[in-house]
Amino acid sequence: MQIPRISRTIPFGYVQNEHDPDILDPVFLELEALDLARQYVKEYSYREVARWLSDKTGRSISHVGLRKRVNTERKRKNKATAYRNWLATYKKALEKLEELEIKHTGSKEKGSSEEESRATA
């Protein structure tokens, strides 16, 4: 999937689009090798994995650049997971709130009549 270019440097796994310099096109060979590299980092050093990645793809990446990329993706994944968990928690809370409002028959009607009076005023 194409991504917008937001910085001066082009990230590993992408190249600049021929027609639009603000769009980056994926390089599937590099992205697949990067996925393997993430797994290899668990067993080998960043230097060794970066050297292997550079040899496999023909595009150089430093061990520092590889570490930044892995850490950034890990943070994004953790943040996305936290947001999904919050969303599930808030959905449950909203469902419980709606159940309580239905049980208290007057509260739902009272709230709707107040809203109607505000809308007409």
Image (tube, rainbow, N blue to C red):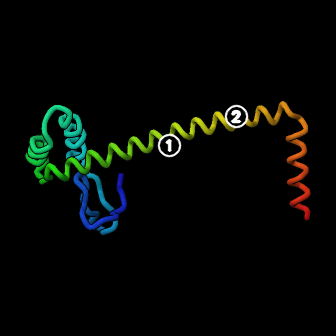
* Rendering coords of residue 28 (x, y %): 25, 46
Q: Which mark is residue 61?
A: none
* Rendering coords of residue 111 (x, y %): 86, 47
- The answer to whether residue 55 is visible is yes
Q: Which residue is mark 2?
A: 95
Q: Which is more toward the observer, 62 or 21?
A: 62
* Rendering coords of residue 92 (x, y %): 64, 33
Q: Which amino acid type is marked by label 1?
A: Tyr
The residues tagged by marks 2 and 1 sit, at their Cα atoms, a distance apart of 18 Å
Asked which secondary structure carries label 1, the reply is: helix
Q: Which amino acid type is marked by label 2?
A: Glu
Q: Is residue 4 above or below residue 34?
A: below
Q: First in sequence, mark 2 or 1: give its number.
A: 1
Left or right of 28: which side holds 83?
right
Give the residue at x 87% y 48%. 112
- The answer to whether residue 56 is visible is no
Quadrant for the C terminus in the image: bottom right
**Which corner quadrant of the image does residue 93 belong to?**
top right
Left or right of 109: which side holds 35?
left
Give the residue at x 90% y 45%. 110
Left or right of 60: which side holds 89?
right
Q: Is residue 88 above or below residue 13?
A: above
Q: Which is more toward the observer, 76 or 52?
A: 76
CA neighbours of label 2 inside 10 A, class few (<14), some (14 to 19), many (20+): few
Asked which secondary structure carries label 2, the reply is: helix
Q: Which residue is mark 1?
A: 83
Give the residue at x 12% y 54%. 60
